[in-house]
């Protein structure tokens, strides 16, 4: 079930032209934060918003709603917390600045492409 949800998330991001869609499996690291991070970026706040809207809609179709959401007011870095999956949608310069990918570099990862 979770594998399907992760694929739906990746497809929802890619459908709206997200860049650098990556899944990090945090389970081997023993973190209590979440099981997975899904991270992507986009070149404009309009696209960041569109990606977030599509992710929310596609997850809702699976019967899943975010437990918490942050960043929808400015579209620089949107976080959608689904409990076992936390989605990060960045404006590209913010992803480069915060380097979240580097923080979790030890986690197994998968890059999704069209």
Image (spheres, rainbow, N blue to C red):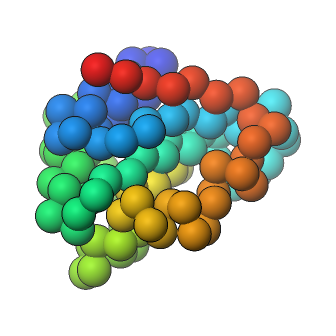
Residue 100: x percent and y percent? 63, 57
17 left or right of 105?
Answer: left
Residue 36: quadrant of the picture: top right
Residue 89: quadrant of the picture: bottom left
Residue 55: x percent and y percent? 25, 44
Which residue is pictured at 50% across the width and 61% down the height? 95
Q: Measured along the vertical axis of the image, is residue 104 above or below residue 22?
A: below
Give the position of the N terminus as an image quadrant: top left
Count of number-bearing discs: 0
Give the position of the C terminus as an image quadrant: top left
Which residue is pictured at 75% across the width and 42% down the height? 105
Does the image show residue 68?
Answer: no
Residue 26: quadrant of the picture: top right
98 left or right of 74?
Answer: right
Residue 61: x percent and y percent? 17, 34
91 left or right of 100?
Answer: left
In the picture as drawn, the residue positioned furthest to the bottom comes out as: 73
24 left or right of 89?
Answer: right
Does the image show residue 20?
Answer: yes
Which residue is pictured at 49% across the width and 42% down the height? 38
- Near-viewer residue (39 or 84): 39
Which residue is pictured at 44% across the width and 39% down the height? 20
Q: Measured along the vertical axis of the image, is residue 80 above or below residue 38?
A: below
Residue 27: x percent and y percent? 74, 34
């Amino acid at each position: 079930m979770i594998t399907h949800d992760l694929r739906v998330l990746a497809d929802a991001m890619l459908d709206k032209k997200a860049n650098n869609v990556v899944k990090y499996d945090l389970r081997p690291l023993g973190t209590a934060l979440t099981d997975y991070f899904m991270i992507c970026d986009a070149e404009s706040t309009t696209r960041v918003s569109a990606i977030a809207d599509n992710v929310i809609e596609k997850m809702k179709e699976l019967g899943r709603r975010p437990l918490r959401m942050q960043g929808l007011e400015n579209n620089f870095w949107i976080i959608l917390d689904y409990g076992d999956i936390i989605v990060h949608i960045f404006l590209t310069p913010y992803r480069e600045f915060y380097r979240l990918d580097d923080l979790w570099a030890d986690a197994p990862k998968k890059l999704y492409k069209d």
